[in-house]
Amino acid sequence: MTATPSTPAAAAAPVAAANDLAFDVIVIGAGYGGFDAAKHGADHGLRVAIVESRDMGGTCVNRGCVPSKALLAASGRVRELADADHLAGFGIHAAPVRFERQKIADHAAQLVATIRANLTKALERAGVTILRGKGRLEGPQRVVVRESGSGIERVYSAREVIVATGSDPFVPPGISTDGRTVFTSDEAINLEWLPRWITIIGSGYIGLEFADVYTALGCEVTMIEALDRVMPTFDPDITKIAARHLIDARDIDARTGVLAKTITPGCPVRIELVDMATKEPVETLEVDAVLVATGRVPVSKDLNLASVGVETSRGFLPVDETMRVLASHEAGAAVVPHLWAVGDVTGKMMLAHTAAAQGAVAIDNILGHERRIDYRSIPAATFTHPEISSVGLSEADAKTLAAQEGFELGTVRSYFKANSKALAELETEGLMKLLFRKDTGEVLGAHLFGLHAADLIQEIANAVARRQSVRQLAHEVHTHPTLSEVVEVAYKQAALAVGA
């Protein structure tokens, strides 16, 4: 199954004898991917150590999905209470809304502390050894840990090593950050202040979620998108309806096809905008603050990957579907013995639950239980108000697959405006698009916008994981009245088209 890398660095590095190995598995990085790998391994009897130089829990717990959802929960309440027209539909008339920025920030910080402590205790109870410091590879089966504080370096050996070092925000060239007036999501989750006018660079899920927070709390937002449409990574039909409600209906000035060539921190912050196609100057903005939400880059440059003969692509580690690290991204590259990678550093689906799934897959393969990860069945969600979610293939990819395999692609739409629960909530703006094979009825993917879309997507994700047909799914009974009936309607519509 494995092949030894032919690079001189890998060949020369000494490999510890089996009886000298201190651990069965060493995990470098204690984010969600590293945590799940370490705990899963320890729960199955492996001697596991985990190395972390920053806060336990990685990006998700400390600087990402956990604190941002706390901010979205609080700001969402403010938005709901401030929507006089919506409340009037129920016959409710509320007093002017007041909120305390610091207490909202404290709510997020307290949630982070709680989950971080819970995660750490879970590892300790499972018997995982926690090594505080920065880890790097030192040839096959060896990890060097530079201890936090003392700076002392210690060498540890393990039968298998899992790299789970995650990612950091990407700051494009020409943009300077100071953490106060120009910052990334790492600083934004602290909610240290509310700029009167903030520019958000990027209209992906991070930019959309923070635009949701800032507009709810009274900030004016300008959104800059280099590509020719906002929300370029989302399904086009979902983008149309979502952009109307999340951008156009709010105090957001969205500009597309322009690039922030330079951003200079200060009071005010200066943004030099140029045309994306021609690079000609368009305008110079002066705003109170800028949030840079232009994606993320892997944390891998200090791992000493050369010592095991691994070549990265833009810093991402090449892996196969079992999470074994490959020598390069080239087709047919050899497996690097005893080395695995999970999470954002692999560049697959940069989501916390993807990292966790990869961690479990890596451990199962280490235990000798052959498993491969199924990225098609992993859902994604954007926690705006309302939410956006998706799973499986995009419509463009589904069309390509249909042409390659010679089947007809089916597409149906189900609307929240016909759903009893959505009508009761006065939240009827929503759409689900279901993609399926017309020959077999197999569900290929789904894209949603609407109330609790992030929860609804899981049902379709399960169907994709099992490669189920809408013929079966159309007979499943859904609780009435619930939003899940939006999914039921789509399944039934699709079933009528199968075989037609």
Image: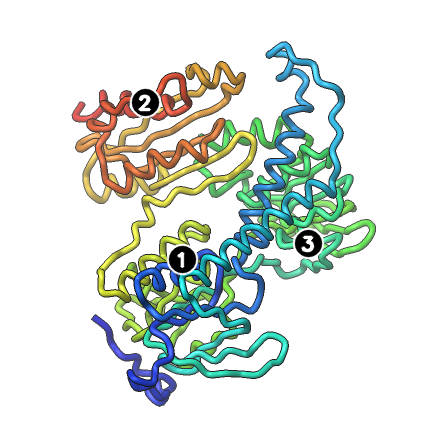
From the viewer's perspective, is residue 284 above or below residue 429? below
* Other-residue count near label 1 (Cα within 10 Å), few / some / many at <14 / 14–19 / ≥20: many
SS at mark 3 in the image: strand
Q: What residue type is labelled 2?
A: His
- Residue at image coords 58%, 49%: 277
- Residue 373: name its quadrant: bottom left
Which residue was labeled with disc 1?
Answer: 36
Q: Are marks 1 and 2 in contact (CB under 8 Å)?
A: no
**Mark toward the start of the polypeptide (2 vs 3):** 3
What is the C-alpha distance between the residues marked 2 and 3? Answer: 45 Å
Q: Name the residue under label 2.
A: 478
Count of marks, rendered view: 3
Disc 2 + disc 3, Cβ < 8 Å: no
* Residue beneath the point at 38% across and 75% down: 310
Q: Where is residue 128 in the image (x, y as percent from the top left)?
A: 42, 66
Q: Nearer the viewer, residue 283 or 87?
A: 87
In the image, is residue 417 above or below residue 364? above
Cα gap from disc 1 to disc 2, whole angstroms: 32 Å
Vertical side of 254 occupied by 429: above or below: above
The quarter in which the C terminus is drawn is top left
Q: Which of marks 1 and 2 is nearer the N terminus?
A: 1
